[in-house]
Image (cartoon, rainbow, N blue to C red):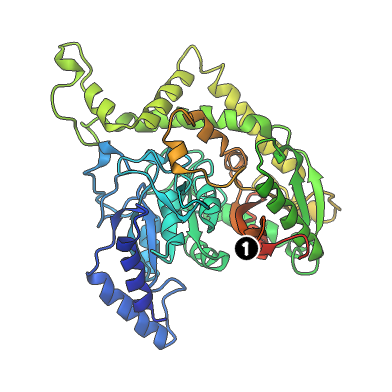
Amino acid sequence: MSLLREAERCVANQYAHGINAFITPLSRAGSWLDRVKEADARKESGKPKSAVDGRLISIKDNICTRDMPTTCASGILDKFTSPFNATVVDELETAGAIIAGKTNLDEFGMGSNSINSYFGAVKNPRRSGSGEDLSAGGSSGGSAASVAGDQCYASLGTDTGGSVRLPAAYTGTVGFKPSYGMISRWGVVAYANSLDTVGILSKTTASVRDIFGLLNKHDQRDPTNLSIQSRSRINAYHQTPRLASRLTSAPLRIGVPIEYNVSELTPSVRRAWILSLAHLQKQGHTIHPVSLPATRHALSAYYILAPGEASSNLAKYDGVRYGTRAEGPDGDGKPDGYLYANTRGKGFGAEVKRRIVLGTFSLSADEIDNYFIKAQRVRRLVQHDFDSVFAAKHPLHVTASQHAQDDSLTHPDVDVLICPTAPSSPPRLSDLTDPKKKSSLDAYVTDVFTVPASLAGLPAVSVPVTVAGQGDEAELAGIQVVGQYGDDELVLNVGEMLEGKSLDEAS
C-alpha cells in the first residue's frame, strides 16, 4: 500500500470511528497531502528520509504543537495554542513524519482510564463479549486507541506511572517507556518532572524501535535530558563483552518478581504471565524468582510524590499567567476573595483538584517530613531493589575501572524482569463512571505493576500476547518487560520475542 493510501485510510478512520481518540484530528485536506506524496516519491526512488517518512504519527495533547491547540484535555487550557513545537515534534517532522492530530487523555495526565477529560471519555476499539464499551487505559488512552483503531501509524504519549504501558495492555498495542532522560521533555506540559517520560505506542516493537532511534538524542534545552557524556558512558558499559553477549551467544536470565503475584491478578492475566515465561524458557532462556521487597510500598510513595510535584507545576494555571479565565468575578465577588479561585475551580476537573489538594497537603510545612520525605526514601529503596537483582549495574553509578572489574565477575543476577502490565483486563466504561461500582482509589491500583519502574526511571515495554480462553475465545493480555537503566535495546528485543504470540499449554 502506498503511503498516500495508508494516510488517507487513517484520516478516514479518525472521523468514522466513534472512539473519541482525538481532541484535534487531522483535517481531511491540507498541506500534509503534498508532504505524503513527496514521501511516496522518495520511497519509490529508494531515498526515504527515515523509517517514518510519510507516516502519520499522533501526539498526546499534553505535548506542545505550534499548528494545533494543546489543551491537556482541560477546560483551563481549552483555547491554548503553543507558540512552539516540543523537541520530539520537531524531530519527527524533520524525519518526514506527519503529525496526525492531538489525542485525548486524562486531564493533565492524571488518571488510568482516560475518563477524566474535558472532552469526554476515550473508548477502547475492543469491546467486551457483550458488546459494551471498555476502558482504553490512561492517561495516554487516546494515543493507544488511535493506534489500535488504525487512525495513525504510531503515537507519542507520556508515561509518569504507567500512562503508556497500561493503555497498550488494554488496547493490544505495544507501549514503550524509555529510561528517564533518554528522550527530550522540552515542550511537554509537566505533571511530575522527576517521573514524566515521553513514550511511544505502535502496533509492532520494530516501529517503536525506529521512532525511539529518531528521538533518543541529547537536547540542551531540557535540563533533565541525558548529556552526551552520560550517553557515552551508558553505551560503553553495555558494550562490555559480558553484556554485549546477551541474546547473541548467551541465553538470558529472566527474573520473576515474587511480590508481583498479588491477589488482585485475574486468572487470565496470571495464565498469560505463566505461559509467556514458559515460551521464553522453551527458547533456551532461564527463569529465576527474584524479590523486590520495597515494591509493596511503591504505589503509596508514587501517589504522594506525583501529586506533590503536580501541585507545584499546576500553580501557574490561574487565568492570568496561563489558562482560560472563567467569566464573572472571582472569590464570589468579595473584596478579600482570591483572584483566581473561580477560574481554577471551574477550569480543573475533579481528579486534578483532588491531586492538587493531596499534593499541597503532603508538601505543607507540618506534613512534608511525614509524607513527601518518607516517600522519597521509599523511592530510593525501590531503586536499590532493582539494582540488586539486575546483572548489569546502573551505568551512571559505576566508574570505568569498575566496568573492567565487573566484567570479570560471574553474576547470578537477572538480565530483565517479566511481569504483567495490568492486574486485569480492561474494565467496562459504565462501571468506571458509576460511583456506586468504582471509586477513584480503585483506578490507582491498576498502576501497581507499572509504577515501580517509573520510580526507578527504568525502561519498560508492554507487549500484547494472546492466550487461549474458554472454548474458542482467545484472551488478550499485556506482558511487561523491565530492564536496567540504559538497557532500552535489550528490553525492546525481549519484548519482540513475546509480541503478538498466541500462547497455550501445548505451544
**Left or right: residue 136 compared with residue 315:** right
Residue at 43%, 40% in the rendered image: 430
Of 425 and 65, nearer the camera is 425
Amino acid carrying mark 1 in the image:
Glu
Residue at 37%, 58% in the rendered image: 89
Reply above or below: 283 against 324.
Answer: below
Which SS class for mark 1? loop
Of 378 and 270, nearer the camera is 270
**Is any part of residue 418 visible from this angle?**
yes
Q: Quadrant of residue 191?
A: top left
Image location of residue 333, percent across then percent down:
14, 16
Q: Quadrant of residue 149?
A: bottom left
Q: How many labels, in total?
A: 1
Image location of residue 165, percent across then percent down:
54, 50
Q: Quadrant of residue 451?
A: top right
Residue at numbered disc 1: 499
- Label 1: few (<14), some (14–19) or many (≥20) C-alpha neighbours in 10 Å: many
**Left or right: residue 334 compared with residue 223:** left
Image location of residue 95, percent across then percent down:
40, 69
**Is any part of residue 394 visible from this angle?**
no
Of 237 and 152, nearer the camera is 152
> The C terminus is located in which quarter?
bottom right
Of 87 and 499, nearer the camera is 499
**Left or right: residue 229 compared with residue 322:** right
**Left or right: residue 263 compared with residue 429:** right
Image location of residue 480, percent across then percent down:
63, 51
> The N terminus is located in which quarter?
bottom left
Residue occupying the far bottom of the picture: 45
